[in-house]
Image (cartoon, rainbow, N blue to C red):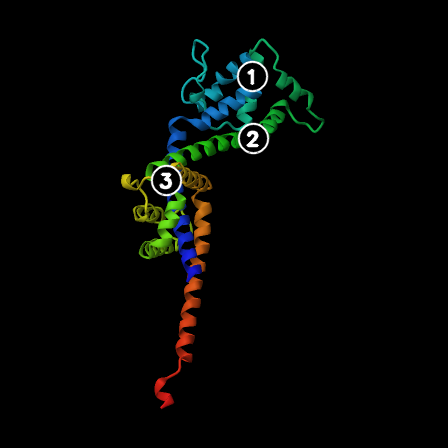
Amino acid sequence: MGLGIAIDVSIGLIFMYVVLSLFVTSVNEAIASLFRMRAKTLANEIDRIIDDEETGKAFWQHSLIRALSDGDVVDGDGKKRVSRAPSQITGDVFATALIEAKDTAKKTSKILDALYRTLDDNGDTPSERIATWYESLRGRMAEVYQRKMLEWSFAVAFAVAVAINADTFAVARALWTDEALRTAIATAAEQAAQNDNLEGLAAREALEQALPAFPLGWDLKALPADLMQWAVKFGGFLLTSFAVMLGAPFWFEILSGFVRARSMARDVARRREAGSALHKPNPQSDQ
């Protein structure tokens, strides 16, 4: 009995993490799009690796870069608008624009000089060498962007957790003590887990519709009474936030595993009940 309750409570918590992760991901995507965070990250990283300001301005004013940008990255007064930069630049475009920017700039770029010195005898042209070097840096640029989005994810997740009182400890306690609530949420999670993944619109809608079933929201009559209780609630918010940061796909896969475990536990319980019924003595046979 205790194991079954623990499984159902775990399913309920994981199900909550899945639903909140979907919501937080949607908010993050909206923030990234609104503030053009991918473009800003790319522009800042390119400015970091182009060591000459004049070469950098010539690079952003190059026709190939302007064709990919959302307006002029460098205004007529020389002020840079990184939010207008393109969100993606391929290696060949970067190499062409950088080489031609160097030719128009008065100063010599140390980066380009270093790359020219690394040309070997295998027939690589400067453009090919720079393109290869840039492509090797794109992985780091992606890591910088992902790190920033991870920070945003935590901030959004924590704000959502506080706003709707998504305290992991409180939700776990409610699920443990309320059998009807625990069963209802576990059943809803079982139905949602029948989808192979989260890509289907029906699966996402089913998960989002399940959120009102959770014991969330603030009750002004049941606020923490002292500093210790507030500290525990703050820890519950932090735990929820860190869990949501892991993302919906991560928790959905774990949810599927727990749902299978719940189904297996029910099957074992049914077999035990059936076995007990078969071995139960018949009072009429003793007469």
Q: What residue is rendered at 62% in x and 19% in y?
A: 111
Q: Amino acid at mark 2?
A: Arg
Q: What residue is rendered at 40% in x and 26% in y?
A: 35
Residue bearing the label numbered 1: 100
Residue 225 horizontal side relative to residue 249, left or right: left
Residue 140, labelled with which disc? 2
Across and down, in percent, residue 127 comes to 60, 24
Q: Earlier in the sequence, mark 3 or mark 2?
A: 3
Q: Earlier in the sequence, mark 2 or mark 1?
A: 1
Q: CA distance from mark 1 to mark 3?
A: 45 Å
Residue bearing the label numbered 3: 23
Q: Comparing marks 1 and 3, which lies closer to the viewer?
A: 3
Dot 2, crowdedness within 10 Å: few (<14), some or many (≥20)? few
Q: Amino acid at mark 1?
A: Glu
Q: Which SS class for mark 1?
A: helix
Examine the image and state in which quarter residue 260 appears.
bottom left
Q: Which SS class for mark 2?
A: helix
